[in-house]
Amino acid sequence: MTQKNNRKQLKFKNNFYIQSFCQQKKKHNIQQFLIINQEISTYFELMMIQKSTSKEMITLFQNGIIGEYQDNEIQTLQQILKNLQKQKSLPTLLIYKCKGRETIHQEYKRFISEINLNEELIDLKMKFQYNIQVGNILKDLSQAISQFYNLQDLYISINYLDCLNQDFNWLTYHFKNLVNLRRLSLNLQKNDINDFDLVLLFQNIYDCPNLKILKIKLEYNKLKEHFQELNINPNLQQIQLFMSQNKINSKGLSNLLEQLSIIGNSLQKIFIDLTQNIINFNSKISLQLYHIFLNLRLSDFCILTSASNPILDIINLIFACFQYELMKINVIQQIMSPSVLFNPKWIYQDLYI
């Protein structure tokens, strides 16, 4: 009884947030609402169009787009997708706390097959969180998404999933078929991803011919140093790697910088978050930074690290920049805590958490 009352109170609280939000400017990005009010997703699936007007948003909420989908109630999601087949941009699909029975795998496959009915889709966002035992969902998901030949913007969030700590490369295995994909955003926190998983993930998207923007959140995984075989797509213009709370060492940063320096001069913006890792800047890293700045036509570069001797590292890094006349680069930072970081606006623009 108490749990039921708590859910009623939560639903009332959600409605209050929704009504308050709808009174704000129509151009407000709906994803900012998701980030600010994370407690809304505690029990509920949120499926919202990114730039809906207030009137459209109220209609969605009144039609039950916010609801609790647990156990095998995936059919409800299927019905919603059928009603949205003609839209080029689907709402954000948050699949949350589906119970762990083997039969759920078949339900997921049917659920994903419904998405494929929309051949005109250009924008897809999916969030999987706190699900258990969903079988080979990554393989099925990749295969299904690869059928969207017109897809331009893809966001997938799969975090806190203990069952998905193996064969993570299946997620992007079929993405080379997405010939029109321009922006790929992946949130892969807390999935026990290691260096070789990341290498395979990058290999799978290497041949995406029109990929321009890549954003990957990899916090709280098992990344360390083996990035020397990281094949980065040469067509990229922007790359953002959020890799804090791993075990990346100076050798790992060195290998990563080496790969960034050889991908071609199309790359314009780089952001790498390596806070809470094991890194000290040394002469080799400074030299590799020189090659990056020399080979690429960057307009923004930002690298965030935490080191055991930050003052000395800052001095070494600034010295390297003066030595190679590289102060034209807008941002190079060495910090102790993420709470004090400064970021260019482009870093978090359209980054769905």
Image: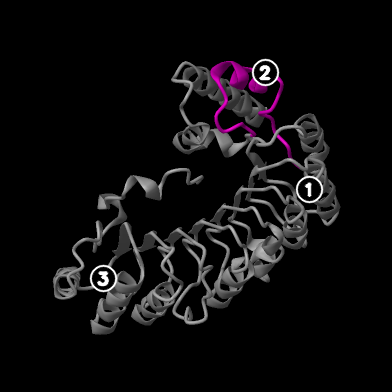
Q: Earlier in the sequence, mark 1 or mark 2?
A: 2
Disc marking residue 112: 1
Above/below status of 7 relative to 203? above
Does any portion of residue 171 appear in the rendered image? no
Position of residue 342 in the picture relative to residue 81 (left or right):
left
The Cα atoms of the two marked residues, 2 and 3, are separated by 51 Å
Position of residue 93 in the picture relative to residue 72 (left or right):
left
Of badges 1 and 2, the one in the foreground is 1
Labels 3 & 1 near each other (Cβ < 8 A): no
Amino acid type assigned to the residue bearing label 2 in the image: Gln
Measuring 55% from the left and 71% from the top, which residue is drawn there? Answer: 198
Estimate the x, y position of residue 174 in percent, counting from the top left: 72, 63
Amino acid type assigned to the residue bearing label 1 in the image: Ile
Position of residue 151 in the picture relative to residue 323 (left or right):
right
Amino acid type assigned to the residue bearing label 3 in the image: Ala
Which residue is tagged 3?
A: 307
Estimate the x, y position of residue 53 in percent, counting from the top left: 55, 21
Circle 2 SS class: helix
Labels 2 & 3 near each other (Cβ < 8 A): no
Above/below status of 46 relative to 260? above
Which residue is tagged 2?
A: 62
State which region is magenta: 47-70
Disc marking residue 99: none
Does any portion of residue 50 appear in the rendered image? yes
Q: Earlier in the sequence, mark 2 or mark 3?
A: 2
The Cα atoms of the two marked residues, 1 and 2, are separated by 25 Å
Q: Quadrant of residue 251?
A: bottom left
Estimate the x, y position of residue 250 in percent, counting from the top left: 34, 79
Q: Quadrant of residue 179?
A: bottom right
